[in-house]
Image (cartoon, rainbow, N blue to C red):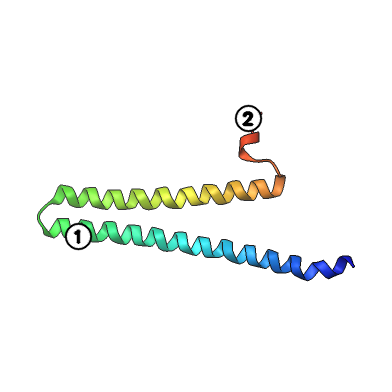
Amino acid sequence: MKDSHLPSLLAVNNLTAGSQSLYTIGVVILVFFLLLAGGFRAVGAFFGGRIGHAWGWAISGIALAVIVGSSYAIYVSAKHTTDQTGITTGQFGQ
């Protein structure tokens, strides 16, 4: 009787692993579009004669991409630690 639940448990594990990789792909696409948007705005400002604005758009596009990418990496790391140990990040200070 115990083995009858095994296939459904494996299916749930496959589903959650698949959704995690979809989230990762989504974050990669978001970071790519942030870099692309910052680059387009920087090129537009550069050819418009506003060199300072071009630098600003380039730096802000890179900064946003780094913030989004590193935030997702921290989230994945904390989730992995919580899944392995059962200790949540709020319990570290207790």
Is 71 on the left or on the right of 33, as rendered? right
Q: Amino acid at mark 2?
A: Gly
Of the numbered discs 1 and 2, the one sitting upstream in the chain is: 1
Foreground pick, 70 / 12: 12
Is 77 on the left or on the right of 32, as rendered? right
Residue furthest toward the right? Answer: 1
Percent position (x, y) of residue 41? 22, 57
**Circle 1 sits in a helix, a strand or a loop, which is it?**
helix
**Rendered residue at 49%/64% (across/down):** 25
Give the quadrant of the N terminus.
Answer: bottom right
**Rendered residue at 86%/68% (across/down):** 3
Q: Which mark is residue 43?
A: 1
Is 33 on the left or on the right of 10, as rendered? left
Give the quadrant of the C terminus.
Answer: top right
**Rendered residue at 67%/67% (across/down):** 14
Identify the residue position indicated by label 2 in the image: 93
